[in-house]
Amino acid sequence: MVAVFLAVYLKIKSMKHSNNDAFNVFCGRGRSLVGFLLFNSVQRDSLKCGGQLGVTSDTACRNAHKSDKAKDGKAFKLFDEKGLFLLVKPTESGWGKWWRFKYRFDNKEKQLSLGTYPEVSLGQAREKRDEARKLVAAMIDPGENRKAVKEARAESVANSFEVIAREWGSKKVETWTEKNNRSKRMLERNIFPWLGDRPISEILPKDILVCLRRVEERGTIETAHRTLQICGQVSRYAVTTGRVDRDITQDLKGALPPAKDEHFAAITEPKEVAELLRAIDSYQGSLPAVCALKLAPLFFVRPGEFRAMQWQDVNLETAEWRYLVTKTKVQHIVPLARQAVAILEELKPLTGHGLYVSNGFENFPAKSVERSRFDTRNRLTRRPPQRHLNTMSVISSLKRVLWQNCFKAALIASIMAPGGRCEFCWNTLFTLCKPKNSRCGFSASAKPSV
């Protein structure tokens, strides 16, 4: 008997238990054989199905659904220490495991979710538990603190510069939904990539200035001023909606160099105008492009409104073209000269069945024409696409006119509105023409004065 107790005592001395306090409770100071057997029995059940004595490794968590308590198919808890436990319960796809931290705050028992296992390991769950215990010790409810952080993050995302800018555009800019809206395009190119995700309340004037300097370095000073103006409108909208206290763009007054106003080049000599008109008359190209070049000096309207001219607005009998002006939304009446009526009558058999006067299907690439089953020589076999001539079609046609006739001139739109804004300026014309053509002698320094 003495030998048996001695062997048991030596075995107890050689073992390393993870919870010495619990061992002492069960075994007592004398470390009796009964206490040793009771401790081993309780610890073995704890590791299998959960208990208050502590989870020693990830293995117990991994195999928790294989324990004896899982055989009932009911949820159970696998306890660690200091309020941490693993909730194991069956789901439709198998067994789910969730980490929970149980604590008391204001004399109420509460639980805090710490993630799922195995995405959150035992060590990570213990670290999160320790952080939550520190909050409890500082008289901060971990659950309420998590809700406050989540709400602050959501509010930060909702009050980001891009969200507010798009909200402002949808309410204040009528053409905001259009793909080529200038204000939206400036913000998307110059501001959103750097400041779009940041809360507008955290943006400083120097942050906006850095973005404007990038625009300035490209040599587009006017675009930088326009971008600053749009940012100011967005900032003032944020002030009216209670997102910020003041418009920070007011601090950037004078930060950008002034934009230099330059008049667009225009032909002022009647002889040169006559040469240009004769060059257009002799041009041979697609019928819509030829008609567009011939009609431009007869209409004196904006290039965009001319390209979007629709047959339903044209009355050849009364020789009138009635349409709504793009900017003012006011009906505009353009009287048609007999030359314009003759050109439109020539063009109507080709594009009269479509929406636009200058349908651009003849300017499509050959592969697109084949796919759409268009026959440009025998008119067409199907309904043409509802698209008008684009800017590049007219530019390409005018480029060929200038190359063929070696004529130095600004574009036709500058004739109609000297000094006004036009999509086809002298610099574009200079880029399109051959600078090394000795016959033409075209150079940027030869700009005519307005």
Image (cartoon, rainbow, N blue to C red):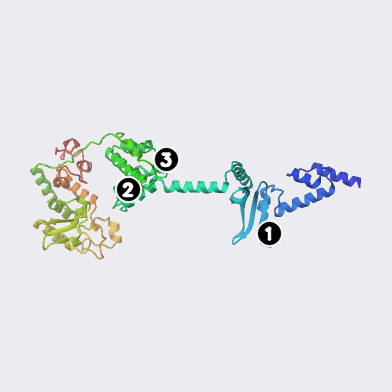
Q: Distance between the residues labelled 3 and 2?
A: 22 Å
Disc 3, disc 2: CB below 8 Å? no
The number of numbered badges drawn on the structure is: 3
Whether residue 130 sits left or right of residue 218 in the image: it is right
2 or 1: tag closer to the N-terminus: 1
Query: Label 1 sits on what residue type?
Result: Ala
Q: Name the residue under label 1.
A: 70
3 or 2: tag closer to the N-terminus: 2
Q: Residue at x 9, y 58 (%)?
A: 338
Q: Nearer the viewer, residue 222 or 284?
A: 222
Q: Name the residue under label 3.
A: 202
Disc 2, disc 1: CB below 8 Å? no
Q: Which of 60 and 195 is in front in this view?
A: 195
Q: The C terminus appears in which quarter of the rendering?
A: top left
Can residue 118 be seen in this snapshot? no
Q: Quadrant of residue 419?
A: top left
Q: Residue at x 16, y 47 (%)?
A: 412
Query: Label 2 sits on what residue type?
Result: Lys
Q: How far apart are marks 2 and 1 (CA)?
A: 59 Å
Residue farthest front in this picture: 107
Residue farthest right in this picture: 1
Q: How far apart are marks 3 and 1 (CA)?
A: 52 Å
- Within 10 Å of disc 1 (Cα), the crowding (few <14, some 14-19, many 20+) is some
SS at mark 3 in the image: helix
Q: Residue at x 23, y 64 (%)?
A: 380
SS at mark 2 in the image: helix
- Within 10 Å of disc 3 (Cα), the crowding (few <14, some 14-19, many 20+) is few
> Considering only vertical position in the picture, is 216 above or below 315?
above
Q: Mark 2 points at which residue?
A: 184
Whether residue 196 sits left or right of residue 305 in the image: it is right
